[in-house]
Every structure is written in structure tokens, then in C-alpha cells.
Amino acid sequence: MGRGIEGLEKAYDIFFTGALIVLAVLVVLCLVRAIIGPRVADRIVSVNMTGTMVIVMIAILALMLEEGYLADICLIYAMISFLAVIVLVKVYMGVYLEGKRKEEKDDDFVVEKGPGEDAIGTAIKEDSGGCE
């Protein structure tokens, strides 16, 4: 009977080790996406995914090592990761809205000249020989 439990523990160790290896590879891929990501939104999602996978890795280590304090660290890391993503989104939205306001401001000052108009947009009166 003791042999069955040892076999099950060995199977869990192999499963958890495999899961940790897969998660480590995925974390590296997410970090690559965070660096390469063509848009800021891709980078923010990548950072969020990386944080989530690290949380899962810490939880798996807590089970493997049978250490309860790692679960506490996992919860604290989850809160910090959540706040980091919120801060990144706030900064990104502030930069985006500032750029949008600046773009709208620049659009207000641009005046297109049509044929026969000066820079203000009023029609240039042609000299008609004194007859108006």
C-alpha cells in the first residue's frame, strides 16, 4: 500500500516538473513578445500573461516543495502584477490621449488653400479694372 502512494508522488513530481518546464518556455516567449510586440497593447498583454504564468509556477512550486509560505508569496505577487498592469494601462492611455489631443489641436490650425484663396481662406479679389 505504501508503494502506491510513492508511485503517485513520483508521477506528480514528473507532471509538475513538466508543467514548470512548459511554463518556463512560455514565459520566455511572452518576454520576447513584450520586447518585439508591434503595439503597446501587445506588450501590456504580454506582461500580464508573464505575471500570470509566474504565479502559476510559484503555486506549483508550493505544491512540490510542500511549503505554505509560497502560497502567500503567490498571492502577494498576484496583487503586485495586477497593480503593475493597471499602472501600465493608465500610463499608456494618458500618452495616447495626449497624442490625440495634440493631433486634434494641430488639425484645427491647418488651413488648406484652395485655388484663388489666401492663407486665411478668404477669396482674393481679382483686379477688375475698378468696377466692383
Image (spheres, helix red, strand yellow):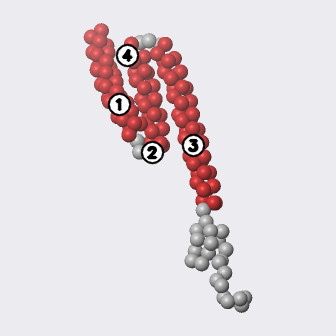
Give the amino acid at mark 3: Val
Label 1: few (<14), some (14–19) or many (≥20) C-alpha neighbours in 10 Å? few
In this view, the residue in front, 60 or 31, is 31
Describe residue 33's horizontal placement relative to residue 88 as left or right: left
Residue 11 x, y percent position in the rendering: 29, 19
For the residues marked 1 and 2, what is the alpha-carbon distance in whole angstroms? 19 Å
- Report crowding for label 2: few under 14, some 14 to 19, many 20 or more residues within 10 A (C-alpha): few
**Residue designated by label 3:** 95
Q: From mark 3 to mark 2, how far is it between C-alphas?
A: 13 Å
Q: Which residue is the extreme one toward the front?
A: 129
The reply to whether residue 8 is in sight is: no
Looking at the picture, tell me which residue is in the foreground, 10 or 43: 43
In this rendering, the answer to whether 109 lies above or below 91 is: below
Q: Is residue 121 above or below residue 40?
A: below
> Could you tell whether 50 is left or right of 113 in the image?
left
Q: In the rendered structure, which amino acid carries the disc numbered 2?
A: Arg
- x 71%, y 90%: residue: 131
* Mark 1 vs 3, N-terminal side: 1
Q: How far apart are marks 1 and 3 (CA)?
A: 28 Å
Sequence-wise, the earlier of marks 1 and 2 is 1
In this rendering, the label closer to the viewer, 1 or 3: 3
Q: What residue type is labelled 1?
A: Val
Contact between marks 1 and 3 (CB within 8 A): the answer is no
Indicate the quadrant where residue 108 lies: bottom right
